[in-house]
Image (cartoon, rainbow, N blue to C red):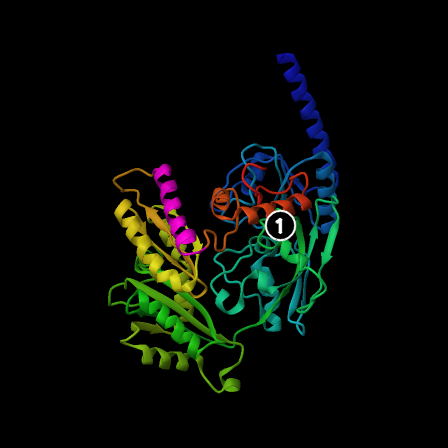
Amino acid sequence: MAAMSKQLSEQFSEQLGEHLAALAALLDERGMLLDAEECRPYVTGARYGNGQALAVLRPTDANQIAGIVAYCAKARLPLVLQGANTGLVAASTPDASGNLLVLSLERLRKTIEVDAVNRSVLVDAGVTLQELNDALEPHGLFFPIDLGANPSIGGMIAANTGGARLIKYGDVRHNLLGLQAVLLDPPGQMLDLLQALRKNNTGPDLKQLFVGTSGAYGVITAAVLQAHRLPQQTATALVVPRDQAAVLQLLQALEQDFPEFLAAFEGISGACLDAVARHIPDIGNPFAPEPVPEYCVLIELSSAGSPQAMGVSLEDALTACLEKLFGDVIVNAVVGRGKELWRLRHAVSEAVRQEGKVIAFDISMPRSALVAFRGEALGLVDSRHPWLKVMDFGHWGDGGAHFNMVWPADAPLAYDAVIVGTLRHAIYDLVVVKYHGSFSAEHGIGPYNQAYYHRYISASAQQLSGKLQNLLDPQRLLGVTWFGEEGER
């Protein structure tokens, strides 16, 4: 028996060597990584996910990707897709089996073709958000998905990223005009949907099959994106509401007075603000000498029209609006200092990490439910786990919230994964069951939250999603996310 096992192992090793040699032949000399140290950045996730890979494949064009996919389908070699590896649910990193190939699109970044008249841009999937905006800026344009990370465009499509300015510009899905993808069936076939059209009612919108599906339905190789005019004026304020109910009163007032101009409405708890002031150099309490408030809201108005053309200054208009609301809805405000206030907002995640082990929640719900949810969730945490520090912030303007909490290092109990798991169930039950929200507002689905997908998504939706995944990837070789029913994979 031992001799036979050794023979089978040697046979597998020989076949694997042949497979890797065949794949290497499809790439240039920098196209395949095998060394464990070189592979380390590709197998370690930004927050979750730490596995092993058979090899890392780094193609430079769509034809190489088509060849890789065709070969892997024939040889039944599984692939996990990866862009800039900034995802937060482990959907772009291999598992611990060591049986997956990482298909990295980081070198697929030659093309950025701007059509300024059409306000569109054709990009390779490996182009990063910063590279895209650097290319758009000379044309007076930008891609308005505002994130703390610098992801690739392909990864942004796969996760359907949103960001802080979704309330004005929408998420990636709303700004995607066209797409190109390599299919698993027929293996290596190119699906070209790269039309730069805003109106195209000629059948199903097939490009949307690849949006928000974590790379499980095909390999995105290029996209046509809608660009927007760069703002010619902005107005920023950090506002202290009278109480939690006043946050939504403030939102309604701003949308009534500035329906086309409200670009961001970001809630920040006092705990987060205090952490930033204590841990991030050169950022203090913007309300000093007054103490940090219990809660505040970062507001941004923006317009592509100049004050001269529009006949109005947004900052003056915002100041007048806040003055009108003072006392009844708000009790304090800092107006202006936009770069400083946005730096504060983007520093929240880093500051919170300094407080202890973060227990992160990326949730959304109807905006009308946010106040009631927050009150109930704070009470739940305080009654069950009083040593936890709730440090929440997020995109209240679009119904999103990062209801994060920290398990401090000096807590009376050491970090306990069982307690955290029970807490997650309780919070998600509130979000999804009681307040009809989502347990994954922006981050998508991956191994980190796969179990909650099966727990909360309806059986009929899972069945249909699984049928689509089986149709597009009948051998289930692509990715580490399964959208069908639990136990079927």
> If the image is split into quadrants, where does the C terminus sit?
top right
Mark 1: which amino acid?
Glu
Residue 33 occupies which quadrant of the picture?
Answer: top right
Q: How many marks?
A: 1
Helix, strand or loop under label 1: loop
Q: Main secondary structure of the magenta part?
A: helix
For the question of whether residue 75 can be seen, the reply is: yes
> Residue 341: x, y in percent?
39, 67
Residue 231 to residue 39: above or below: below
Residue 253, quarter of picture: bottom left
Residue 44, placed above or below residue 122: above
Which residue is denoted by mark 1 in the rendering? 106
- In this view, the residue farthest toward the front is 460
Residue 44 lies, in percent from the top left, at: 52, 41
* Residue 261 among those drawn in magenta: no
* Magenta-tinted stretch: 416-437
Question: In the image, residue 173 lies at what x, y percent?
Answer: 58, 61
* Residue neighbourhood size for the residue with mark 1, other residues' Cα within 10 Å, grouped as few (<14), some (14–19), many (≥20): many
Query: Which part of the image, by quadrant, shows the N terminus?
Result: top right
Question: Which of 31 and 303 lies nearest the eye of the viewer?
Answer: 303
- The structure residue drawn at horizontal position 29% and vertical position 77%, both measured from the top left corner, is 326
Drawn side of residue 422 relative to residue 486, left or right: left
For residue 353, above or below residue 2: below
Please indicate, yes or no, whether residue 386 appears anywhere in the rendered image: no
Q: Residue at x 37, y 37 (%)?
A: 418
Q: Position of residue 149 (x, y in %)?
A: 50, 55
Magenta stretch encompasses residue 423? yes
